[in-house]
Image (cartoon, rainbow, N blue to C red):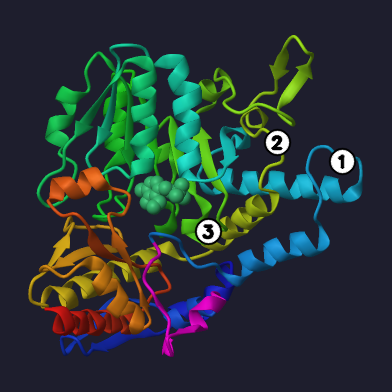
């Protein structure tokens, strides 16, 4: 719920006795996690007879009731297609869809809603930019700079573009603790570099990259920048003015919104000049059998009937998200990470990938020769949902020298009791397989 429902949330200092280490710690903020958890109906679920401990938020977050209600209300009471109808329901649906765009724009510190394109998610947003901007601007011999910690979604579309254009992919390496090696950046920003595409937060390491600084360095050299915000937006508001990128992309489903909806932000001057990448209804001005002309953004990039209920759900997710006290919640997420690191590190053979200070609440780990899928299966039997595999980041895992890892990823509704349950379950996996 928006801010007012969070009133009682900040009233009690948290003191948690953590069984895994026996330590007692007072946290420097006030949060009653139970209040925020009440907003998420699924968190009451049991799996395999145990309370659900949902630590797969990096894959997708759970949804608050306000988002579920917004979608249900649209489908039950307001379902209609947008833009085309002369009837009341269609006008209402169009208003709700436009309102969702305006909400996203406003909460990201921007002022032009037309700079925000609704897409299916991060993957589609990057494909759109690679097709529309990339095919227009990238030529043979050009260079596209990525980083070693990118998700496949921010690698493969550029690889395809490079192959189409005869361009070259170059890669900014990471340091041993999992930060971007910024010392190597100036030499990689050459007079051939046309685009720098970089993740805001690593989905494996949790590293929060200094994207403002990186974008500034690129901008000074006339290089276009795209920031993948998929793992950043769930953990607090993102101010696009502060980031200073040309394109910013993210998925709704990782930040309390529904799946199948996401956002491409594009700087107005760039977007205005771009050709559409998908064509059809609802994005054209005039069509004849000889030729067609296209509407300005955002319509130009939203061919066909969009995900209307998804956009409305995303608008509700943004309103909910913006109503939370992120100063408190960030401190809470930081403390969850610290507690998870401390509890897990004492388990023999366990290694955590990504130890950069100030990381997002993502804890990836390996444990001796135990296969991460086996760890995940034991954890599941204890009600603990984590991810195991390559996390769609095979080049990063190759750099780390591991084929796969287990990953616990937290959201602001997770608790210290859940960190304890995680640690106990990992101990169990260690005893079983170790
Ligand atoms: N980038 C990052 C950093 C991600 O974590 C993800 C999802 N795991 C994606 C891109 C792709 O997001 P989606 O599957 O929602 O398109």
Q: Earlier in the sequence, mark 2 or mark 1?
A: 1
Q: Which residue is mark 2?
A: 304
Residue at 64 percent of width and 53 percent of height: 310
The residues tagged by marks 2 and 1 sit, at their Cα atoms, a distance apart of: 14 Å
Instruction: Please tell me the numbered disc located at residue 280.
Output: none
- Horizontal arrangement in the rendering, residue 379 relative to residue 229 (left or right): left
Q: Which residue is mark 1?
A: 85
In the rendered structure, which disc, 3 or 2, sits on the residue that comes first in sequence? Answer: 2
**Residue at x-position 78% and y-position 43%:** 82
In the picture, which quadrant includes the C terminus? bottom left
Instruction: Specify start and end residues of the magenta stretch as a single range.
Output: 39-57
Secondary structure state at the residue bearing disc 2 = loop
At x 36% / y 29%, what residue is drawn?
A: 158
Which x, y percent locates residue 431? Answer: 14, 84
Q: Which residue is mark 3?
A: 322
x and y, in percent, of residue 367 in the image: 14, 69
């Amino acid at each position: 719920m928006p801010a007012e429902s969070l009133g009682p949330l900040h009233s009690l200092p948290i003191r948690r006795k953590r069984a895994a280490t026996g330590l007692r710690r007072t946290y420097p903020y006030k949060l009653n996690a139970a209040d925020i958890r009440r907003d998420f109906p699924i968190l009451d679920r049991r799996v395999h007879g145990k309370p659900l401990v949902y630590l797969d938020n990096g894959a997708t977050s759970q949804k608050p009731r306000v988002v579920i209600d917004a979608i249900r209300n649209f489908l039950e009471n307001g379902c209609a297609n947008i833009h085309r109808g002369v009837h009341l329901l269609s006008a209402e649906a169009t208003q709700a869809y436009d309102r969702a765009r305006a909400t996203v724009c406003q909460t990201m510190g921007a002022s032009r809603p037309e700079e925000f394109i609704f897409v299916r998610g991060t993957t589609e947003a990057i494909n759109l930019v690679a097709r529309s901007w990339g095919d227009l601007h990238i030529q043979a011999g050009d260079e596209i700079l990525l980083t070693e910690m990118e998700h496949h979604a921010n690698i493969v579309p550029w690889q395809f573009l490079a192959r189409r254009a005869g361009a070259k992919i170059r890669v900014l390496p990471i340091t041993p603790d999992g930060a971007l090696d910024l010392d190597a950046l100036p030499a990689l920003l050459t007079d051939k570099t046309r685009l720098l595409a970089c993740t805001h937060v690593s989905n494996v390491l949790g590293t929060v990259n200094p994207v403002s600084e990186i974008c500034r360095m690129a901008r000074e050299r006339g290089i276009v920048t795209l920031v993948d915000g998929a793992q950043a937006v769930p953990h607090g508001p993102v101010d696009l003015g502060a980031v200073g990128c040309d394109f910013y992309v993210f998925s709704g489903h990782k930040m309390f919104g529904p799946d199948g909806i996401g956002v491409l932000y594009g700087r107005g001057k760039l977007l205005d000049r771009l050709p559409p990448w998908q064509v059809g209804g609802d994005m054209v001005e005039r069509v004849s059998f000889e030729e067609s002309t296209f509407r300005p953004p955002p319509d130009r990039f939203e061919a066909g009937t969009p995900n209307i209920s998804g956009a409305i759900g995303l608008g509700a997710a943004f309103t909910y998200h913006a109503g939370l006290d992120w100063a408190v919640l960030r401190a809470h997420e930081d403390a969850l990470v610290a507690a998870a690191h401390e509890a897990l590190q004492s388990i023999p053979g366990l290694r955590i990938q990504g130890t950069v200070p100030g990381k997002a609440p993502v804890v990836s780990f390996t444990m001796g020769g135990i296969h991460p899928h086996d760890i995940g299966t034991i954890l599941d039997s204890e009600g603990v949902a984590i991810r195991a595999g390559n996390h769609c980041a095979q080049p990063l895992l190759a750099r780390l020298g591991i084929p796969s890892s287990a990953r616990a990823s937290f959201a602001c509704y997770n608790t210290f009791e859940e960190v304890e349950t995680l640690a106990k379950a990992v101990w169990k996996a260690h005893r079983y397989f170790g």
